[in-house]
Amino acid sequence: MLDKIKALHSEIESLNAADAAEVEVLRIKYLSKKGEINALFNDFRALGPDEKRAIGAPLNELKTFATEKINILREALDNNGASEISIDMSRTAAPVALGTRHPLSLVRAEIIDIFSRLGFTLAEGPEIEDDWHVFGAMNFAADHPARDMQDTFFIQRTPDVLLRTHTSSVQSRVMENSKPPIRIICPGRVYRNEAISARAHCFFHQVEALYVDKNVSFADLRQTLLYFAREMFGPETQIRLRPSYFPFTEPSAEMDISCNLCGGKGCSFCKHTGWVEILGCGMVDPAVLEACGIDSKEYSGFALGMGVERITNLKYQVNDLRLFSENDTRFLDEFTSAHK
């Protein structure tokens, strides 16, 4: 048995392992319950007293030596692994590509920030609405085309449940449940039954603003619009108001800004007029105030609404609305610097 112990000692002394799996194989071979050293201990039990005294010490030394050898091999592999994952000082400090905010989110946040400086607070409402808050309270006639299936996504009829076509429904909800003064901005997604193209989509994003108080005038509206245009597009921006019609405002107007590409001189973008339309606005119709429980003889107000996609197109010269919803990272990566 002494010869076998010496042979195993020499064999273990020369052991090597390429990875942790090989170390485990060696441990099982020599140190497990069914391993070679444990087999020697089983044979040791059958020896006489004199033989046990002669073999006991070398056998224990063999087991201790094998255990130390296995641990040395394992530690060597651990140290090699640590050196392999050491820091490479030539690598970039930010190896993981980070995402950026969507261009519509960037512009939406900027619009909200501009109006918040004027004291407007954020108001939100449901995208699935009833006819009253979308159309009835907003002074739409019963036979208005917007109430047709061809223009609006209806979920059910009688009672009418639909996807809101504008965020004016948020205004009607706020006016129903709040007393003037009211000064809110209402951002959100809206839906209209339109063919998808470079200039139109079946859903888009709006931001509307409402101000109701005593003695609110059209002059207040104009100055608010001028402040917004210059904060959004630059201090040299000019505005122009053209008469228009909306069921919920009277008088109503479309607002143009001087083209931010040519500075109002005329180019292909503004169709050589020097002006670009960006939003609709007007004084809140007294019928809307009364429908929402506000005394139109005591209070007046103005409202305005704009498409976020439209403002984004003007700010970043995006020529296809579909790019905003296609999730093409090549397009979205262009706005990384805008995010910063």
Image: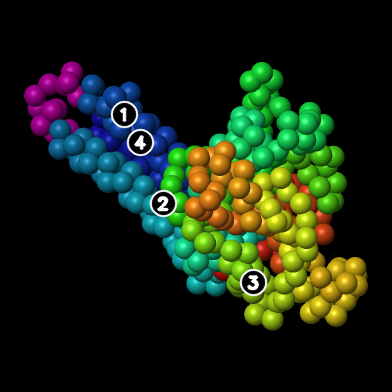
6 relative position to 290: left or right: left
Q: Quadrant of residue 258?
A: bottom right
Q: What residue type is labelled 1?
A: Ser
Q: Quadrant of residue 272?
A: bottom right
Point out the tag, 2 or 1, that comes first from the N-terminus: 1
Residue that appears at 63% across and 64% down = 218
Residue that appears at 67% across and 57% down = 282
Q: Which amino acid does label 3 sit on?
A: Leu
The disc placed on residue 77 is 2
Graded by Cα atoms within 10 Å as few (under 14), some (14 to 19) or many (20 or more), the crowding at tag 4 reads: some
Residue that appears at 12% across and 21% down = 48
Point out the tag, 3 or 1, that comes first from the N-terminus: 1
Q: Is mark 2 on a helix, strand or loop?
A: helix
Residue that appears at 51% across and 53% down = 299
The disc placed on residue 27 is 4
The residue segment tinted magenta is 44-55
Tell me if label 2 and label 1 are in contact, CB under 8 Å: no
User: Magenta region's main secondary structure?
Assistant: helix
Q: What residue type is labelled 4?
A: Arg
Closer to the observer: label 2 or label 1? 2
Tell me if label 1 and label 4 are in contact, CB under 8 Å: yes
Residue 243 in percent (x, y) is at 78, 60
Q: Is mark 1 on a helix, strand or loop?
A: loop
Whole-angstrom CA distance, mark 1 to mark 4, is 7 Å
Q: What residue type is labelled 2?
A: Leu
The disc placed on residue 32 is 1
Residue 74 in percent (x, y) is at 36, 47
